[in-house]
Image (tube, grey):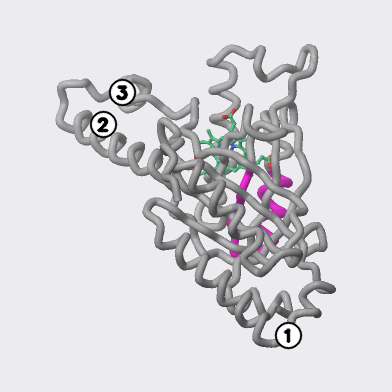
Amino acid sequence: MQTLPEILPTEGRHVLHLCFRVEYSAWELLNKSSRIAAKTALADLVREIRGTPSTQLLHFSMVTPKADLCFMLLTPDLQVADAFAKRLAIALGPDILTPTFSWFSMTERSEYTTSDQEYALTLEAEEKLTPESPAFEEKMQAFRTRIAKYLKDRLEPNLPDWPVVCLYPMSKRRAPGQNWYALDFEARKKLMAGHARVGRTYSGRILQLITGSTGLDDEEWFVTLFAKTTSDIKAIVYEMRFDEVSAQFAEFGEFFIGLQLPLDALYDRLML
Ligand code: 76R
């Protein structure tokens, strides 16, 4: 096969969320050995994808009939993402999986992360540390380490196996007099700091991945939340609605809840 030049982002990963319905009428027509062969083919492909460098594949059983199963694929090269996506769609055989929903996005850094300079100013203003002091340098060093890890988690996430997953697209409002993109940077940064403050109270209970889809798909971001219980999902999304950024500027698409299961448990759940 011809090897095409890679299509790489300047940093981070391409991300595909791919949701399917299982066509049970077609599955019922397969005999036992064909079913085993189909499940083995998908399992082999999952293993191949997981063995690809810098690539992660997750799969979910979806809780309502909006979809039966979804894959979430993160990989740098868009040629690879596209090829894997097409193979996943037919790995169980033709006519077994029908796409019901999909999203294309990319991991991205936040525009609003605290810069070195801003942090240095807070140390001087709030902690009364002078730049020459060892304590100042120590704190700056700790800050740089924290930011580097944070940035890596955002751009090259290593997603957890937490069982509850919530997926939805969202955009920032662009209405006359209420246009996020007409606010200046400082105003947006201040609003996002409030958002992050709420978010951090869910540390350890919610792990969020916000990927950007402006120019790539119908809304501007795709939200992937991981939790150990649906109560935390419901609570954070509810609480965020009161936070000014969401209250004033958030527009939401369709919501999906999935369960992250090992592949054999997923097959059992789907009665395949
Ligand atoms: O990334 C960070 O941790 C830094 C602060 C931060 C940014 C920049 C942050 C923190 N978010 C950021 C950006 Mn978020 N987030 C959402 C939703 O349902 C809703 O109302 C909104 C969906 C949730 C639940 C959530 C959770 N966040 C964004 C953006 C991009 C906006 C932009 O760039 O203009 C969107 C669309 C968005 C939406 N956010 C956090 C959380 C949580 C839990 C945190 C804290 C993370 C942590 O500190 O561990």
User: In the picture provided, is 266 more to the left or to the right than 68?
Assistant: left
Identify the secondary structure beneath mark 2.
Answer: helix
- Please identify, in this view, whether the residue under mark 3 or under mark 1 is nearer the observer: 1
Residue 79 location (% of width, % of height): 50, 43
Instruction: Give amino acid for label 1.
Output: Asn
User: Residues under labels 3 and 2: Cα distance?
Assistant: 7 Å
Circle nearer the N terminus (2, 1): 1
Circle nearer the N terminus (3, 2): 3
> Residue 30, located in which quarter of the rendered image?
bottom right
User: As drawn, which residue projects farthest toward the front?
Assistant: 1
**Which residue is disc 3 drawn over?**
120
Residue 69 location (% of width, % of height): 69, 63
> Residue 62, located in which quarter of the rendered image?
bottom right
At a point 72% along the width and 75% down the height, the residue shown is 270
At a point 59% along the width and 58% down the height, the residue shown is 87
Instruction: Tell me the magenta residue range.
Output: 223-239
Identify the secondary structure beneath mark 3.
Answer: helix
**Dots 3 and 2: beta carbons under 8 Å?**
yes
Circle nearer the N terminus (3, 1): 1
Residue 260 location (% of width, % of height): 60, 66
Residue 73 - label? none
**Which residue is disc 1 drawn over?**
31
**Dots 3 and 1: beta carbons under 8 Å?**
no
Task: Please tell me in which quarter of the rendered image ligand 1 is found.
Answer: top right
At a point 45% along the width and 64% down the height, the residue shown is 48
**Residue 4 vertical position relative to residue 271 in the rendered view, above or below:** above
**Which residue is disc 2 drawn over?**
140
User: Residues under labels 3 and 1: Cα distance?
Assistant: 67 Å
User: Residues under labels 2 and 1: Cα distance?
Assistant: 64 Å
